[in-house]
């Protein structure tokens, strides 16, 4: 064919028209919105009920002094997410697949048990969040938690979850209200600047506990499982990876900007109201008080909508990614396209995790905020094991070829893993010695 010009479709009258073109700026915006997927969902799922409880408590108990932690954690989160996404793009395999193929059996079982323990705790926190959010609308936990569990199970089993995932993601945008609330609360911007750029550590158990909890909240193990599997499943290669890298960092900055302003708004309202003494948040209703400067009487309802969306978003991602990962690690059939008879382990694990979360969330008189904080504290204590496994894999040339970590990348990543490990060990040691009357912290 001599004429290689593209064929222009004809309309009903036979006339031809060139394809409609959007303005360059609009096409650019659409392109970058199109690449947002695994990174944004994984990062924003971190602003779930446990995340809101953690960031609200950081502000209400310690004011602006912990803002620097979010700067460090944003960098750490971006680095870890990028490494897992890169492994997915280079190998075409999920994280649990690589662990099974590159570690001895006993170590594989141990690492996957850590994943199960960490993810199981967070799954429970999501259903506690669903129940707490519906409580703000007057729905009791014994109704709200089972309804949430049934909804998630049916959406995933029928293959509809991917379609409604974006709806849940949009609901979490309610938390933008924290930004406006922070400004309207007239915070001390000098103290905010100091708290952001000057690291301070208070020598007391509550402060160290909160840092470890913040680490477990922001760099949660399930996010690494999810993003690597999603990148591998989408078939993203290293040719397209530069766009995925952008998405990972945009997701990290976006989600932690929201977290930053949650701390600012609770510091400017709850911490200031306590005259600088700090106050522990006891319920979701108390956490919603930080939105009052912007939303007034609607603060509680708006907070409930945002928390419900965040909990439903993560409640679908978590049991699914955990079931996939455990099935991959031990060689069982998996996938939502398989029936229960074809993939009994996959569907059994998925159902068991949801049932467990629902049962705990239905318990009466739960100390919601404290329980959420403890579950993410567990994540922070277990995270170092996952980080060292990721760093081992990403530096294997037989797996990654020329895409292994560069020296500077390794220096920062290993520093993060060592610091997190040190904090976790120090906290555990302080708790053990406390039983014998020895106090390491005030």
Image (cartoon, rainbow, N blue to C red):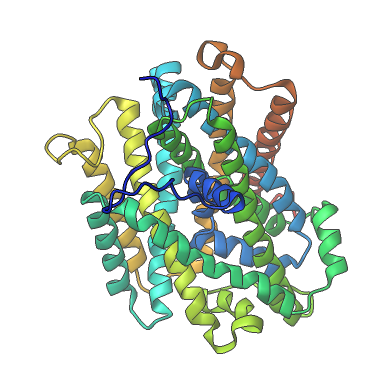
Q: Residue at x 69, y 21 (%)?
A: 406
Quarter of the image with the C terminus is bottom right
Residue 439 visible in the picture: no
Left or right, residue 293 beside residue 199: left
Q: Which residue is drawn at 57% across and 37% down?
A: 243
Considering only vertical position in the picture, is 387 above or below 366? above
Considering only vertical position in the picture, is 163 above or below 133? above
Which corner quadrant of the image does residue 65 belong to? bottom right
Quarter of the image with the N terminus is top left
Considering only vertical position in the picture, is 367 above or below 231? below
Residue furthest bottom in the image: 297
The number of numbered badges drawn on the structure is 0
Q: Residue at x 27, y 51 (%)?
A: 156
Which corner quadrant of the image does residue 286 belong to? bottom right
Residue toward you, 168 or 131: 168
Considering only vertical position in the picture, is 125 above or below 110? below
Residue furthest left in the image: 341
Query: Residue 161: percent from the left, percent from the top?
Result: 31, 53
Residue toward you, 64 or 396: 396
Query: Residue 164: percent from the left, percent from the top?
Result: 34, 58
Residue toward you, 354 or 403: 403
Left or right, residue 395 beside residue 438: left
Query: Residue 246: percent from the left, percent from the top?
Result: 61, 40
Residue toward you, 265 or 277: 265
Residue 216 visible in the picture: yes
């Amino acid at each position: 064919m001599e004429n290689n010009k593209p064929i222009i479709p004809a309309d009903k009258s036979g006339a031809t028209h060139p394809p409609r073109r959007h303005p360059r700026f609009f096409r650019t915006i659409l392109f970058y919105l199109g690449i947002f997927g695994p990174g944004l969902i994984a990062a924003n799922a971190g602003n779930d009920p446990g995340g809101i409880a953690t960031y609200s408590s950081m502000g209400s108990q310690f004011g602006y002094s912990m803002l620097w932690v979010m700067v460090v954690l944003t960098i750490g989160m971006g680095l870890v997410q990028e490494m897992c996404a890169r492994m997915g793009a280079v190998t075409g395999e999920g994280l649990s697949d690589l662990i099974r193929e590159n570690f001895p059996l006993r170590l594989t079982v141990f690492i996957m048990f850590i994943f199960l323990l960490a993810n199981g705790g967070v799954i429970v926190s999501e259903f506690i969040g669903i129940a707490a959010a519906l409580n703000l609308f007057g729905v009791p936990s014994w109704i709200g938690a089972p309804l949430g569990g049934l909804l998630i199970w049916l959406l995933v089993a029928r293959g509809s979850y991917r379609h409604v995932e974006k709806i849940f993601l949009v609901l979490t945008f309610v938390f933008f209200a924290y930004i406006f609330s922070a400004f309207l609360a007239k915070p001390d911007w000098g103290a905010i600047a100091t708290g952001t750029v000057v690291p301070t550590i208070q020598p007391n158990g509550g402060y160290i506990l909160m840092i470890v909890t913040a680490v477990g909240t922001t760099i949660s193990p399930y996010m690494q499982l999810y993003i690597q599997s999603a990148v591998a499943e989408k078939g993203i290669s290293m040719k397209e990876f530069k766009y995925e890298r952008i998405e990972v960092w945009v997701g990290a900055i976006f989600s932690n900007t929201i977290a930053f302003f949650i701390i600012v708004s609770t510091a400017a309202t709850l911490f200031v109201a306590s005259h600088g003494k700090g106050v522990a948040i006891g319920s979701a209703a108390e956490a919603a008080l930080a939105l009052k400067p912007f939303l007034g009487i609607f603060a509680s309802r708006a907070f409930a909508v945002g928390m419900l969306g965040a909990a439903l978003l993560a409640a679908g991602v978590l049991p699914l990614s955990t079931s996939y990962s455990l099935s991959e690690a031990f060689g069982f059939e998996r996938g939502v396209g398989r029936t229960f008879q074809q993939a009994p382990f996959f569907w059994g694990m998925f159902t068991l995790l949801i049932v467990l979360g629902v049962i705990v969330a239905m318990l009466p008189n739960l100390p919601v905020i404290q329980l959420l904080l403890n579950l993410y504290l567990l994540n922070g204590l277990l995270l170092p094991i996952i980080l060292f496994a990721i760093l081992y894999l990403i530096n294997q040339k037989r797996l990654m070829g020329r895409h292994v970590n560069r020296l500077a990348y390794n220096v920062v990543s290993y520093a993060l893993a060592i610091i997190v490990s040190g904090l976790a060990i120090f906290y555990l040691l302080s708790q053990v010695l406390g039983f014998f009357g020895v106090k390491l912290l005030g």
